[in-house]
Image (cartoon, rainbow, N blue to C red):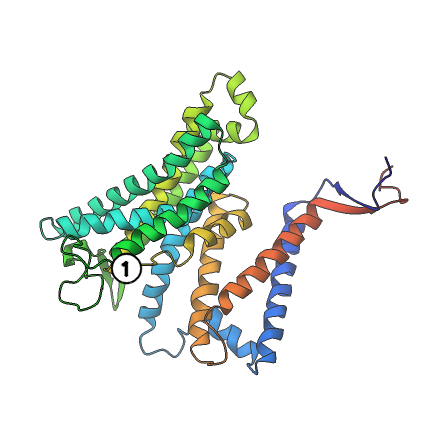
Amino acid sequence: MREPLFRAVKQEGAGPVRQLMAYGTAVLLALAVGAALLAVQGVDPITFYKQMLTMGIPGSRYPWRAVENFVKLFVPLLIVSLALALAFKMRFWNIGGEGQFIMGAFWAGFAAMRLGERLPQPVMVLVMALCGALGGGLYGILAAALKVRFGTNETLLTLMLNYIALYFLQFFAETKAPWNFFLDPGSARPKFAKFPGSAQMILIPVGPFRLNLSLIAALVLCALIFVYLNYTKRGYEIAVVGDSPSTARYAGMKVGRIVIRTVFLSAALIGMAGAFHMSSAGVMSASPTNDVGWTGIVVAWLAKLDTMGILVVSLLITVLQFGCQTASAAYPSIDANFANLLQGVILFTVLAADLFTRFKIVVRGRKEAGK
């Protein structure tokens, strides 16, 4: 067989310093591309990036409000990214974060509308979190059970389940009927009613700033998942199943049970993130996810499924998204979705940098180094 003209050969010795330098260069390259696009539209890139990175806080009359809104975006992204990493470490490609988030939000909203007037706020917020976790977990376990029993493709199945969940929620958003208690009965057109006060997220006053309790919960979850993956038997089982299911079976592990358990945990955490988001918003929405299920995949892979890396990357991506929205408000020619474009460019440049740190391209006819 004829040798191909180009071959990718894995190279050893790509240490963390070299990788960090490659990633830094990739991000700078992506920012340069973004700067060129901004300049074409007549926007000063330096000014735009300055406002983006500072999120418009300097000079603002109410800077704490920007931080509060930032937290509302950061918490769901962090939890969803951590949850997806759990499944990805096991090589179960859970692409259903959007659907699991929606189902978690729906059942949390269900609890809020049915029980919100009867329970005190701390209990109600906890009940919403549990209902969201259960709703998201059961929705995710469907794909895991079919994968274990029939060997279905979890990527396609979880992807399709996203749209089922979306249209399920939109049905309640658009159907004005006496039994649909989600809607405001005083509105002529279908409109979600606000949650009772006890169903809204607990805010802890810190001076003028109100600390969202979900931020503390997200950071605690981050620490727990780190311990779970690195210092528990079940975390070890996830790693073994991800490396080789055959080896796991040979070692006596019940692979099917591990898959179902881990996917349930992953989806339950995503559903809990949906519950936290709904409680913080105080009202249901026909599209509550803010694409967090897709962005979480990007975050998990950029962080190489590392728990602490996910915390850092989630923070940076949220700064990018929220900062772009804030900066775009000052420039009518710039769409708020510029953040998605810049995020995509960063993803591709970082993936390219990762490729070239781990592999080298060998041209036919040239000898590889060391041979």
Q: Image point 15% across, 55% down: which residue?
A: 198
Q: Image point 48% across, 64% down: which residue?
A: 320
Which residue in the structure is indicated by mark 1?
211
Does residue 57 lie above or below 26 as drawn? below
Does residue 272 lie above or below 326 as drawn? above
Residue 79, can we see it?
Answer: no
Q: Which quadrant holds the C terminus? A: top right
Q: Quadrant of residue 369?
A: top right
Query: How many callouts does the rendering have?
Result: 1
Residue 233 horizontal side relative to residue 364, left or right:
left
Residue 329 horizontal side relative to residue 27, left or right:
left
Residue 306 horizontal side relative to residue 112, left or right:
right
Q: Which quadrant holds the N terminus? A: top right
Q: Position of residue 35 (x, y in %)?
A: 60, 73
Q: Position of residue 168 (x, y in %)?
A: 31, 50
**What kind of residue is marked 1?**
Leu
Residue 29, can we see it?
Answer: yes
Q: Image point 30% across, 53% down: which residue?
A: 169
Query: Which residue sits furthest bottom?
Result: 42
Of residues 347 and 45, the one drawn nearer to the viewer in this rendering? 347
Of residues 242 and 208, the one drawn nearer to the viewer in this rendering? 242
Q: Position of residue 327 (x, y in %)?
A: 45, 75
Q: Position of residue 93 (x, y in %)?
A: 50, 40
